[in-house]
Amino acid sequence: MTLEKIPNISVDCVVFGFDVISKSLNVLLINRRLNKPNKENIIIDDYVLTGYHIYKNETLDDAASRVLNELTGLHNLYKKQFKVFGNPNRLMNKKDIIWAESENFNLRTVTVAYYFLLPTHEVNLEENPYNANWFPINNLPELGFDHEKIINEAYEDLKFKSLHEPITFELLPDKFTIKDLQDLYESILGIQIDNRNFRRKLIKKKYIIALDEKQTGVSKKPAQLYMFSRDVYKKVYEKNFLINI
Amino acid sequence: MTLEKIPNISVDCVVFGFDVISKSLNVLLINRRLNKPNKENIIIDDYVLTGYHIYKNETLDDAASRVLNELTGLHNLYKKQFKVFGNPNRLMNKKDIIWAESENFNLRTVTVAYYFLLPTHEVNLEENPYNANWFPINNLPELGFDHEKIINEAYEDLKFKSLHEPITFELLPDKFTIKDLQDLYESILGIQIDNRNFRRKLIKKKYIIALDEKQTGVSKKPAQLYMFSRDVYKKVYEKNFLINI
């Protein structure tokens, strides 16, 4: 593969992670820093999504996976190409123009945006060269380029999909409690869900499988662990797919 | 607006139309023809989606609307940016290479694909300069570039959305019969739906509003006409949006 990059097409990756301990839906961001003040005395110190130009012989999906792998070391995560951002003025803030000059990139760049889903603990952030960190979706730092818009649109898509597709399970560990799942829905949807109703509904779902295992290392009474079965979900979904009409 | 085009980024538009008379979900395609055989004696005579490069000062959405308006004369249709196609070899069929040479465009073009929804009768195809025609989704002609793939992915997205969002109504006239709606679902989903069940379910939906009107110009007993209310749908949806969890 030649590494000649296409100067005006990029991918950007919104990495969503759910932190089961703090019950927080987070986004992985990297620090963008330019220390030398320019003539207008602007110092850049904000956060951006991980992203890069695509290479000439590379598919868009491969470019997104490559960028994510460079940041996290991970492969084969749930990945969704959700939108393209191509407004002529999307990189025209003063800071972005200064940054683009220092990095020598094209201000009329169209970016193909992906989101990735995983439990936060799968990423080892120690010694990462990008100064990356998790931020709660509801408490994001100052963002560069149009990345606040990109994150917001990814989040809207995730909210919608969480109600219609079994993608939420990508954000949980393989084994989880019903409370974990409820915490996750509450943090995605930004709402309070009634405990008992949720539990009653969820344990009836055929694709939520009770394991012969309980939580370990908790001080309170250990809760039952469950897994999600994609195979069962598919069967159930195929059978019911006309229900929503 | 300058009309300088960006040579390696385009939009392509899958125009879905529902023909209430023939009960067929159709796609609007334009004829691609190159009459002068080249040295390999290849004559091009196939069909493609309508599409074009984006201009330097233009948003992607505006580019898609512009292309659609040039073909149909229509504005303000339902429009959905559903995927980007950027495989390095997506325009590398022999016919496409010959075509690209004659049209002088870049073979490494990334295209942002949209679909549009409308009832077929809204488009007047007489005297259109592009030799455009409707084709049933299940009986498409030979297609150029990667447009078969683009149409198939648009169709999958439409199928999924038709079960979760009220976009199907965009394909119907403002006033429709329950039978029209059933025909539409059957043609989108490629299935047979039980008449009585469908009618019973649908007339209970608060957002399907019975009008004080019946069909005209039909030989059989004229059927009740209905309209779809987006306002009511929103209210109902907001109330029920946790049902699917």
Image (spheres, coloured by chain):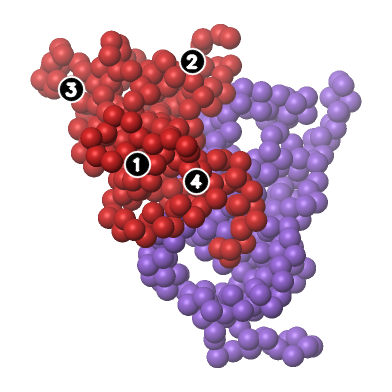
Chain colours: A purple, B red
- Residue name at image x 56 percent, y 40 percent: B230
Residue labelled with disc 4: B208
Q: Nearer the viewer, residue A177 or B231?
A: B231
Q: Nearer the viewer, mark 1 or mark 2?
A: 1
Chain identity of mark 1: B
Few, some or many residues within 10 Å of mark 2 (<14, 14–19, 20+): some
Q: Nearer the viewer, mark 3 or mark 4?
A: 4
Query: Of the residues under marks 1 and 3, which one precedes in the sequence?
Result: 3
Q: Nearer the viewer, mark 1 or mark 3?
A: 1
Residue labelled with disc 1: B223
SS assignment at label 4:
strand
Q: Position of residue B131 (x, y in %)?
A: 25, 17
Chain identity of mark 3: B
Alpha carbons under labels 1 and 2: distance apart: 51 Å
In contact (CB < 8 Å): disc 2 and disc 4 = no
Residue A186 seen in render: yes
Alpha carbons under labels 3 and 2: distance apart: 26 Å
